[in-house]
Amino acid sequence: MSTDTRSTDMDRDQGNGRDAGDGEGRDEGGADERYDAVVVGGGAAGLSAALVLGRSRRRTLVVDAGEPRNAPTAHMQGVLSRDGTSPADYLAAGRREIAAYGVEWRAGRVTGAAPDGRDGFTVSLADGTAVGARRLVVTTGLVDELPEIDGVAERWGRDVLHCPYCHGWEVRDRPFGVIAHPVMPAHQALMVSHWSKDVTLFLHTAGELSARDAALLDAAGVRVVTGEVAGLAVEDDALTGVRLADGRFVSRSVVFVGATRLAARDGVLRQLGAELRATPFGEFVAVDETGRTSVPGVWAAGNVTGPQEQVVNAVSRGYRAGAAINGELLLGDLEAAVAGRPTG
Ligand SMILES: Cc1cc2nc3c(=O)[nH]c(=O)nc-3n(C[C@H](O)[C@H](O)[C@H](O)COP(=O)(O)OP(=O)(O)OC[C@H]3O[C@@H](n4cnc5c(N)ncnc54)[C@H](O)[C@@H]3O)c2cc1C
């Protein structure tokens, strides 16, 4: 990016070309500042929304608690042109890009949001401050609640993996173990059998396999081991195998396991009364294709809307939300001007 597009202190003082009337002054709800948009969560989805909003000359704040879902992993895969980049480097690049358009960034946690009575919201932060927002984008992600098996949390994102699209290529042809998910016991083993022909499925606490699952696993060449898993064995900072409760040991260098629950970090959305939808993975906020929730003025994007949003999808959804917000503000202000109503 050429330096002449970067904002300077003087740009910021002069509003960086934004509508100076919007977002200035103390908010009626007690907020110190009022933004066109506040983005709650600064991962892939939030940064992407912020980039569009900044480039749309919208006064935008990103508040981020700094716990992106893929933080435990060293390399982010499957992101075109950034394949293999570390998640931390990727997000740092995103923060530099949004700063170039005057978007503000605050490390912190949003604890709640409430309507401010003037077509916007008062957003409360854990440090006791509050800011005003005409529109909100919630991109707070989700938490993978892992099965309580000794070693799983410690090795998560390293040699305990969940997603073949994220990691399968890097561990291809190695001896895989898969710890069966109680709801879909065969699914993950069938998927990963495409990346290695040496796959052992540990039924752990899952019940008996259906005849169809057993046939599919057999066709995929997956061995099935019954009995509860006690833990993972690790030597020299590398996984060496799976220990069973009855004392058996099966040598493996990679283990795939699904989260027992994918818990959307949707506290702010629930507080605002956003509609949820039931999915096979649990409840997630209902959004339209632009990310608009059932609460007027509130958008959501990324993993808070569903577990299948990989980084590229999260970026795409964040982009759509940012563009939709700008469009709504723009047309809404013009409508208000025509009707002689105040804007912002
Ligand atoms: C181990 C692992 C490896 C993965 N590898 C890959 C991969 O290789 N390629 C790929 O495409 N995908 C990968 N993923 C999936 C990837 O993590 C997600 O696609 C991506 O993180 C979704 O982005 P997001 O912006 O929705 O959420 P996140 O990246 O989780 O960002 C949400 C942000 O919001 C912040 N936040 C939460 N609550 C609040 C609050 N109340 N106030 C302020 N901030 C808040 C969080 O701290 C976090 O920084 C992996 C996931 C895991 C678990």
Image: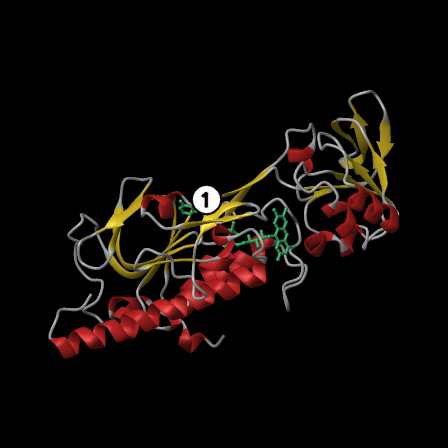
- Residue 207 as seen in the image, left or right of residue 225: left
Q: Is residue 238 above or below residue 60?
A: above
* Residue to which mark 1 is pinned: 265
In this view, the residue in front, 311 or 106, is 311
In this view, the residue in front, 294 or 35, is 294
| Residue 101 appearing in the image | no
Q: Position of residue 205 (x, y in %)?
A: 71, 29
Amino acid, disc 1: Arg
- Residue drawn at x 38%, y 69% as measured from the top left: 324
- Residue drawn at x 34%, y 70% as measured from the top left: 326
In this view, the residue in front, 99 or 247, is 247
Q: Position of residue 35 (x, y in %)?
A: 27, 60
Seen as rendered, the residue at the extreme front is 211
Q: Residues within 10 Å of mark 1 (few under 14, many from 20)?
A: some
| Total numbered labels | 1
Q: State the image quarter where residue 185 is shown.
A: top right
- Residue drawn at x 37%, y 48% as measured from the top left: 269
Q: Position of residue 197 (x, y in %)?
A: 88, 50
